[in-house]
Image: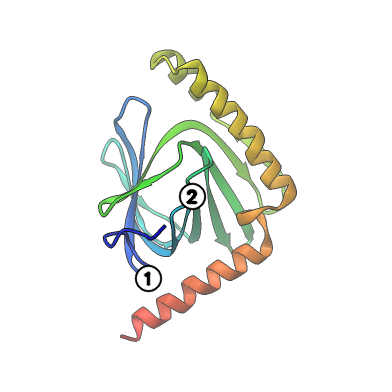
Amino acid sequence: MTREMNQPKEGEYIAIKSYKHDGRLHRTWRDTMVLKNDENEFIGCNDHTIVVEEDGRHWMTKEPALVYFNKHNWFNIVTMIRKSGVSYYCNIATPYVLDREALKYIDYDLDVKIFPNGDRRLLDVDEFMMFSKKWHYPQDTINIVMGSVSELTEWIDQKRGPFSTEFVNIWYNRYLSIAKRNNSR
């Protein structure tokens, strides 16, 4: 299967938009460089990009971050590359869709944060419970979300994909190489 001609290509920049279950825009990351974009996966990197919150507030990320999305997983993974070490912020969310405007997904509130020392925390359980009642999440969606937390935990334990040192090194070095090439033009 070939990619559509209008899909973002390696080295181009796209926005990432997260939505809530009710359809409202939650958060936008303005500039993420495309590192890989095929029919199943998207890998990108942003570095000091502007983030716009739903209420219009904006802030800038503090470090380079690899982003990993897969069309078959109800989670995405942000790998933050800090001087103190690599940390992760994982969103439990729908598989992504990508068009010329942005990469888009629905955020289901639950997050897993992993610190450089390996400690991890499940975050925003109260938010998930509140919104699941407020927006009447279907039971199928709740089951998928809870199953995705378990699947994500397996990935973490197995150091699969973005949780492996090799993944981080390969894709961060790829980002640096493309950024250098783009800046020399």
Instruction: Examine the rendering and report whether any part of residue 126 can be seen.
Output: no
Q: Secondary structure at mark 1?
A: loop
Residue 104 vs residue 6: left or right? Answer: right
Residue 135 figure quarter: top left
Q: Residue furthest bottom?
A: 184
Q: Residue furthest front?
A: 1
Image point (62%, 63%), residue name: 167
Task: Assess disc 1: are there few (<14), some (14-19) or many (≥20) residues with their C-alpha within 10 Å of its C-alpha.
Answer: many
Q: Which residue is mark 2?
A: 69
Task: Tell me which corner region of the image, top left, top right, bottom left or bottom right, holds residue 34.
Answer: bottom left
Asked whether disc 2 touches disc 1, contact meaning CB atoms under 8 Å apart, the reply is no
User: Picture coordinates of residue 129 (x, y %)?
Assistant: 51, 18
Q: Position of residue 130 (x, y in %)?
A: 47, 17
Quadrant of the snapshot with the C terminus: bottom left
Query: How far from the left and from the top, in percent, is residue 123?
Result: 57, 33
Residue at the spot 43% in from the left edge and 35% down from the top edge: 107
User: Residue 21, located in which quarter of the rendered image?
Assistant: top left
Which SS class for mark 2? Answer: strand
Q: Amino acid at mark 2?
A: Phe
